[in-house]
Amino acid sequence: MLDADGQHFTRNIPDVVALVLNGEADLVIGARFIKQNGDIPFYRKTGLKVFNFLTNLFSEQQVTDSQSGFRALGGKALQYIDFASEGFNVESDMIEHFSKNGLVIKEVPLNVRYDVPHTHEKHPVIHGAGLLSSLITLITYRRPLIAFSIPGFILFIVGMVFGSLAFAEYYITSKFSFVYTLIGGVLLILGLLLFISGLILNTIMVLMKKEAKVS
């Protein structure tokens, strides 16, 4: 697989397919960040780092270029092309699906060029927002503890801080701070709800996985 807009160099094909042909990997990704690549625009590097972090988070796979379209798939990987994906999310969805099924994923370094006309049919902001939304949705579904419980715990702690400030002000002045009390109360309730929701969703997900294995 490689993008059809001229960004990739066909001379890199032997490097990308080598690990598949040697039986060392089921999916090989041509990565742009393994070696220094000054041709990648700064905004792309920044966005890709965010997407890499989110993809690695929900897929439990460590890759440096989750959005690279230059890939080689082995015979085993072709047997698992049965996942649903829409639009430009296929790169992340493929990594998550293959990782979940125990396939070996590796990367090799390559260069790309961005001085080609019409490199993308979507505006970078629109494309990035859509991809980010999809990744967050997957993380919410796959990792409810990370998506709900951890933010809930943080909000709860912040609420405790505001509550302590309100109590301290009352202790000193005998007057409650309406602002501190309101913010603290809202954060405590919201944090507790998110924390409990994450625990419940995680329990449901674990039970569903066990049921799927039994069936």
Image (cartoon, rainbow, N blue to C red):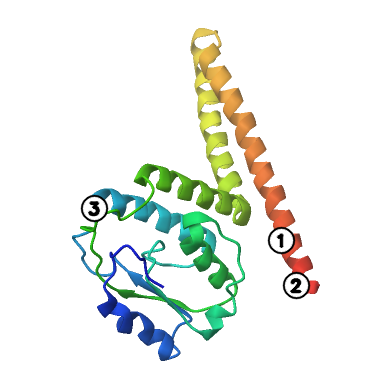
Q: How far apart are the two marked residues, 2 and 1, measured between alpha carbons? A: 11 Å
In the displayed structure, would residue 12 be above or below residue 152?
below
Instruction: Determine if residue 109 is in view.
Output: yes
Residue type beneath disc 2: Lys
Where residue 165 sits: x, y (%)? 49, 22
Q: Secondary structure at mark 1?
A: helix
Q: How far apart are the two marked residues, 3 and 1, measured between alpha carbons? A: 41 Å
Instruction: Determine if residue 60 is in view.
Output: no
- Residue indicated by mark 3: 41
- Residue indicated by mark 1: 206
Q: Residue furthest right?
A: 215
Residue type beneath disc 3: Pro
Write the residue at 34% across / 72% down: 30
Question: Which quarter of the figure has residue 126?
Answer: top left
Instruction: Tell me: 132 left or right of 97.
Output: left
Q: Which mark is residue 213?
A: 2
Q: Nearer the viewer, mark 2 or mark 1?
A: 2
Q: Residue furthest bottom?
A: 22
Q: Quadrant of the N terminus?
A: bottom left
Write the residue at 35% across / 46% down: 124
Q: Nearer the viewer, mark 3 or mark 2?
A: 3
Where residue 160 sits: x, y (%)? 55, 30
Q: Secondary structure at mark 2?
A: helix
Q: Residue furthest left?
A: 38
